[in-house]
Amino acid sequence: MSEHRRKPPPPQGGGRAAGRRAAQPPTSGRRTAPPSNAAGPGRGRGEDSRSAGRTGARDVPQRGDAAGGRRRSPDAGRGRRDGGRPPVKRFIDYPRAGKTGARRWIPSWKLMAGMVVTMAGLVVGIVGVALALVQVPSAQKASVVQKNVYYWADGKQMVVAGGGSLNRQIVPIAQIPLSMQNAVISAENASFEKDWGVDPMGIARAVVKMAQGGETQSGSTITQQFVKNTYLSQEQTLKRKATELLISVKVGATKDKKFILAGYLNTAYYGRGAYGIQAAARAYFDKDCADLTPSESAFLSATLNGPNLYDPYGGQGPAATPEKNTKRATDRWKWTLDREVQVGRMQGLERDKWVAQGFPKVQKPKPATNRAGQIGYLTDLADNYIVAHSRLSKAELDKGGYQIYTTFDRDKVNALAKSVEEVRKANIKPKVRDVDQFVQFGGASVEPKTGKIVAIYGGENALEHFTNNSDYTGVQVGSTFKPFVLAAAMTHGKRNPGLGPQQSDSQRTIVSPESVYNGNNKLTLREYNGRVWHDQNGGEWRQPNDGDEDKGLVSLRTAMQFSVNTPFIQLGMDVGTDLVQEAALKAGLDKDQLSSLTPTFSLGTSAPSAIRLAGAYGTFAANGKQTDPYSVEKVEKNGRSAYEHEKKSAQAFDSNVANNVTDVLKTVVESGTGTAAKLGDRPAAGKTGTTDGNRSAWFAGYTPQLSTAIGMYRVDPNAKKQEFLSMRGVGGKPTIHGASFPAEIWADYMGKALKGQPVLQFDAPQAIGEKVYGDGASPSPSPMPSTSPSAMPSPSASSSPSKHPSRSPSPKQSCSPFDPKCKPGGSGGSGGKHGGTSSGAGGGGESPSPDPTGRQPDGGLFGGPGG
């Protein structure tokens, strides 16, 4: 073959022919190249060389494919065509090369593992840097204790208290008994001696528990509690919590566990003003902490869980009564002993010994000595208000340094205390009469339009009597509750007997104060539709009146004027006790201080505090506008505001409803059971109240400028079973009622408090509602006049039986034709099997508590609070 017809050697890339040959399958699994010096017949060396070069160029890709046993990747071909470079590999292969569809976007396990390692490294690095940067504050600077300064409403200093007077004594760990250490570690942080200062599992458990809606848990270790008490504030913020965790880790790594435990036990708050284990041992057991028994230590560890709820002598608020606190403390004490056995810090036999001996005996509280007279009650009330309405905790407040500006008027506080003590000194003589022992007074005075608590009377002396009688005491208020029933009747109306129990206001009949009800004694209680009411045992209830008097058909105005019970318990049934409760709450009473919704709810089985009662009456004085009572205007520290009161009010009742209630209550003071509360030419409205067994007596009333409630009761603080005692014979009087000492104190105080202030008139009421006739009443008989109270046979419902009592109603008036148990004309008699008992004389009308069998349980037939 001639040279000019020979094709030039193919390019190194192979061309199309090489591509075709590469696509042909190999002839064998292994290809052997011919010897390099082999020459075909008829070929010279030069030709052989050129031929071998061309053959080699063709054979290279074929050998590569045959050796790999697979076809080349198109990318590889392109790479060689692009210069022979292999594909570039990425550090993070995402989206993933060589994958299509959704798989291209799914990270590989290598990528995921790398991300996890990277994140863990970042977290460790950040925490490491944070730990390196955070500094443990100086405990000395953080725990400097100062005093708080309290100011009167006029800005003048009231007292310097708290803070520096804290009952705190630091003791070394050697003086803290091992039993106390074991109790606290077992109950609070069983892993304390092994953890790093924080417990991640504990925090996780707390988060899960809260997420599940279970009991709120802090997840804090003893180290964290020590750090918070010693170095940080008590504010609840993420920044403070993060700082606490970091410092806790650092403290846990650098401080000895004994040092941390001693610091915690010496800084923790145990209640009764006691900070630290030594002060707590003295406050509860009057001994040094070194002498505490394992049983006493178990109890003290319980107080760390919330001293207000674990002091057996009670705390602040209706949830912290002595009974409830004792139950909680006993349960926690027993649980702590069991827990010590569970974690191996006490032997079972020793636990059994202490359990057999019973709950340890705790001594009565002994308050600090700088709060004599009413000052202690005032500062306590202010402290409690601050803790309840601001971000400041009790522990933070007790560290001191705050300026507390109160609403208390010094002149009014002194005037109220003087009025009470004058009545006490003149009438209550415990050395002469045994029955005069344990008599208590409580009172509060509130501005209706602002809600400011201007005065309270908490007891004889805050250093001797430790319960603030102006705050919650559990004392029933009796007939002072009736205005809320009337307000509900004038707001929502009486239910229509022909409709179901759930009726809208448009289906009801708004009730006028001139509506007529049967006021005879021991009437059979009926439901709104006229059916006889039966209790859960099938018994009827026949409501007694004060002094077992029959009053005949009376208007609601007259029934309020002379505190007749039967019309108001029936009115409550006609309106619905749920709406009576709603009216009381709208007026400003606290739901936690109200009794259960049973028929006698309308007669005052609830036990609101004097403060709340005065505030609720103030709603009527303010034309239906309700403002919560408050005692602190503002709190400052180092020139900065720590709390400031926000003024809030709401229209609880239509102004005409409130004005009509006021007009009815004016009748009580002018010519009813409250005449002892007259203020001369100054108009006043109010209501007397006396409870079953003569166990408490009240007078609550108001002028346009001031609303005040005064309560009186007896209770033996030394008795094993705390109960309210009868006041019959107190002060040499056969009975004590709201028209006696409480009304006398009220009038004397209000005269002093309002001296020099203008005489303001109440807004005149407009006609409201319809004159309805309650069960047993009828338009045909002439009811007792209501517009002329002087026409009543007796000036007071409680002074003596009526000279001309109304005749007993006819069977048609008092009995349902479907009631076989009702005997005609018997409504004024003994009441039969279910007639109840006499409630005793009392200006305020009684709150019945006997059950249908004649028993008189402490809690009342319908489950109201005792007394």
Image (cartoon, rainbow, N blue to C red):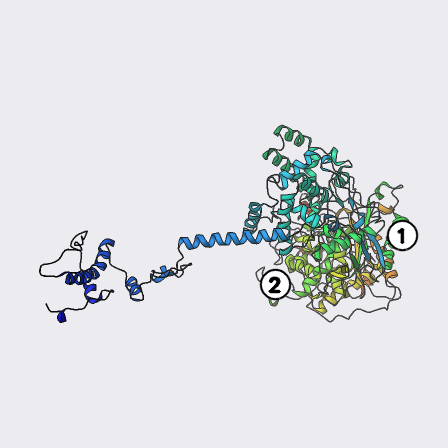
Residue pointed to by mark 2: 496
Q: How many other residues sit within 10 Å of disc 1, few (<14), some (14-19) or many (≥20)?
A: some
Frontmost residue, 779 versus 128: 128
Amino acid type, mark 1: Glu
Residue pointed to by mark 1: 422
Q: Dividing the image into 4 quarters, which one contains the N terminus?
A: bottom left
Left or right side of 65 for 186 = right
Query: Which secondary structure, mark 1?
Result: helix
Frontmost residue, 809 versus 251: 251
- Furthest residue to the right? 426
Frontmost residue, 327 versus 565: 327
Name the quadrant containing residue 283.
Answer: top right
Left or right side of 1 for 627 = right
Compared with residue 75, is residue 356 higher up or lower down, i.e. above or below? above
Seen at 11% across and 69% down, the residue is 2
Q: Is residue 556 visible?
A: yes
Residue 128 placement (x, y as % from top left): 58, 51
- Furthest residue to the top? 349
Measure the C-alpha gap from mark 1 to mark 2: 51 Å
